[in-house]
Amino acid sequence: MEAARATQLPGELRYIQYEHALEETYLPAIRALISKDLSEPYSIYVYRYFLYQWAHLCYMALNPADNSLIGVIICKLEHHASHSPPTYRGYIAMLAVSSAYRGHGIATALVKMAIDAMAERNADEIVLETEETNLPAMRLYERLGFLRSKKLHRYYLNGNSAYRLVLLLKSSAGSDVNRQPT
Amino acid sequence: MQNFDVPAPPPPNVSHPGVVVTDITDKFASAVKTLSPGELVKDDHFTLFESVSALEIMDPKMDSGVLSEGESLDEEYDVSRLLLPEEILGIIDQLLCLEMAWHLGYPLSQTLLTSVYVESLMNPRPTSIDEANFTRDPEICEKQPVLLFVLRAYCLGMLKSCYLVNQLVKDELYYEEEDFVTNTYDRTLLNDIPEASIIGLLQKARSDLRAAGNVSKDISAALDLRLELRIAFMRAIDLSTLRQANPDSLKMPWIQMRGLMEHIEKNHALGKSVPEAFSTKLQRRLASTMPPRPIVQLSFEECYGHFRRLFQDGIEVTDVLKYSEPQSLLTFVSTFQAKKPQPLVFIRTLLQSLLFKEMVVLGSYSIRQILDHDLSLTVLPCSPQIDPANDNIEVPSDPRHQTAAQMEIFRQRVAESYLDIFRIFCQNRCRVRRTLCHSIQEWDMLQADVEEIDNLLQINLDEKPLHTERGEIGYALPLSSWAYLYKLRQMEWIVQLGFELEVYQPDELAGMYWYLNYLAKTRAQHGDRIKMFNARSLDMARNRANHRHPATPNSSNNGGKKTAATATLSAAQEREFAQSKSYIRATMLDAACTWEFADGLCCLYTALGRVGLVGPSSSSYRNDLLRYEIRTKPFAAIGLPQRPAFDAFARATDQPDTSVPELLRYAAGAVAGARKGYEALAKTPDAQAFCVGAHERWVGGVRDCLRAAIAAGVAVSTLQGAYEKALDGAAVGGGGEGEGEGRKIEDSELDVKLKMEIPPPGKGYHDWWVVPKLTPLP
């Protein structure tokens, strides 16, 4: 993500939820927008893996003038059981805003929509990874209340490390942080 | 989109006995018509991993067969082409850069295996040294460029070194792809060809090079240095397997390489690079589905810097074999791995292999020796509990026999977790922190388990509870106590690595320093407890010696009553008690420094929060209780010390009843205390600081902490001054109405006119001490 560009927004953006019927119209644009910031492309299966199963957790920001894609967020929500206790974990897989429209809070608006949608579906927590060098993304998430839970060494193919960011929505089962030590 | 209207290609001609061919084209075509494009038929086994590894045919970034217009599939570089001597030098230096890129964690496919010369040596797989040539055709061989034998010998030495490094890494704990890529893509890296014959070839190449008359002296010397480097590299790895040898002799090839590298850097400019001798197309021939990816190209300056550090680390790492006691060993490993930049995986795995291999520690010691040594240094100086003579008692009813048996159970239980602490430190820093988070769970259970052994042994050894002027302290519980000490240290490291890895946001710093303070204070208190029991053991031992009783456990106890006894212990026993005493003193001093400094920074960051320089984000999703839950998750299940309740944590961090001036006064005192502590620590001789063999690195770290404490003192007084000034300004400004009624000015209303910068890791004095830089604004 680059620093804010001072492009005037074309009026009030349209935010819509993705659905399978929109694939033909928007999937090519979604791929193009997301792969711009990726060193390695995702195959079409990666997009379909998310969009087909969690279309309700994907939101798009559209230009009101021509309905073209300006921003997108893609998520999933699943039971995560690799450690105990198992959690119902939301995961923000991809987030992108067209560089000309950055700095207007579009990404924040998309993330909030995704958080709300996952919270409504009873998610316990929301996690994501972000490149250590991607300060704007980290600032965005941290302003919303996400915490860095761990650092992942050389997580990306380009050799950069990542931070895992977590937003806990509910107290985890069995945890009682407010218990007074005996 | 592909045009599917073209006529179908003819079916492949499959003829094999036992294979019945059925054409399913029509069935398949009609079946897919029932799906709309993009509709996914997905079973539960098709995971995200599968979808990420899927390839799209005809996408040049995924399909390794896609060629652009006029592009050839294969590399057409001719390895028998003419090469100038300076080009050979240039290629070698390019190879050095690629080799280093591999050491840094990039795959061979994007580094050394992009060399056309390397590929021709390795494919087809050579089975003898003679076959390992750029061309296997003897006629063409004859016509090879004059100095190609230098490149050949160099490459063979380099590949064999890579093979040896790869084997070393694979034998130890590392993370594939995260730390290092051991994948050789079905290239064997010359494992069939003995090292001796490769070294022989390198030596022959050196003498042939000297004999070759038609090469400029400078280039000839430059090439010779590089051949010598290859020989030394193999020798360094070979020697490192002799862990019982004198460590200084293991260093020789590393010292030699460090010197060679200096010269190599100086004459690098003589070479002429040959970029066309490297190609990403070679990746298509490797056992991989990945389409060609770019060559990882380090600059020669970067490459030289990394090699210089690699060789320096290689020199230092062998010193680990100079064992004195387990605490110095731990200091050696932890300070060595804390170096910035961290030693490469090759060195980190080399350290692991020196530490522990084939059940032997440091090439010479049993796990038991190290463990018992550690116990005697910490909680059981001169204790009958770890007396090796107990092993000789065969009568099962004899308490000594039972003690020996219980201690063996103890060692079995803890050995793996104990060695793991050393292994964990050999990982990358992110992994160290995360693995310690798991390790403390193990040590928490281990502490409970060994406490049962303590309970059995206290009956066996007829121990009495300790009474002091403070009342009854209870039983010594040495094994549990020992485990607790290690658990506490690991918990502190987890928090400290959080600072180092920039895991905490500025508004978390006050809280995390408070928690660090809590842990360090707990360790200091625990040290105090151990000290009391060790003092009792000393009294008892002196009594025993005084009464000239045989040292049987049953007669060794006087119920904890202190008796004035004259010292008649042997010099060795006195030394053991004294050493344990200095260890406890050292760990308590270290804990005190940590607790004071952490306390000071906690107060400073809380004060900075009050005046609005460190502000929490305000978001409707933010919930401080849940944030605390995530942050303290690794500690949630730990029985002792228990995670503080959120309310207690929040109160202790925010200190709502303490004013900013009081907070800052407190911070100034604490930071000054830490500073004095670090000054004292820095003066401690290595044997008493338990950093024998690592003193330089250790004292460097202590001095960095000292500098950080001084900087923190400056920050505190800057804020003190700015706060007073702001308060005066506010009183004057709001004087008219405020003064009479004595309206209290809120801290958040004050403008302290300061700019705060939090230095990122590597930019402050010490990564574990995040000290804010405060500069007055005009």
Image: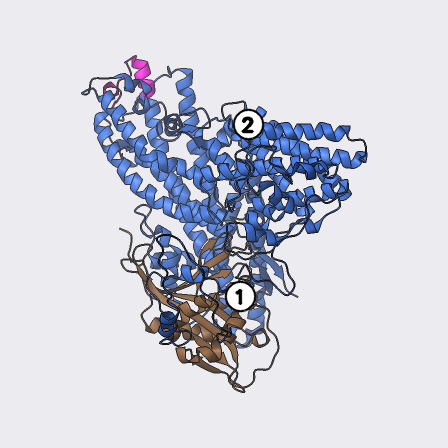
The subunit letter for the residue under badge 1 reads B
The location of residue B277, given as percent across then percent down, is 68, 48
Q: Are marks 1 and 2 in contact (CB under 8 Å)?
A: no
The location of residue B495, given as percent across then percent down, is 44, 49
Tell me the mark number nearer the camera, choosing from 1 and 2: 1
Segment tinted magenta in the rendering: B541-558
Q: For numbered disc 1, what is the local secondary structure?
A: loop
Above or below: residue B649 compared with residue B528: below
Q: Residue at x 24, y 29 (%)?
A: B458
* Letter of the chain in blue: B
Q: Is residue A142 left or right of residue B280?
A: left
- Viewer-side residue, B343 vs B710: B343
Question: Tag 2: residue type?
Answer: Leu
Q: Is residue B329 in view from this perspective?
A: no
The location of residue B96, given as percent across then percent down, is 65, 42
Q: Is residue B292 left or right of residue B412?
A: right
Q: Residue at x 62, y 64 (%)?
A: B68
Question: Tag 1: residue type?
Answer: Met
The subunit letter for the residue under badge 2 reads B
**Which quadrant of the view contains residue B522?**
top left
- Viewer-side residue, B498 vs B420: B420
Chain A: what color? Answer: brown
Above or below: residue B54 compared with residue B37: above
Residue matched to label 1: B58
Residue matched to label 2: B239
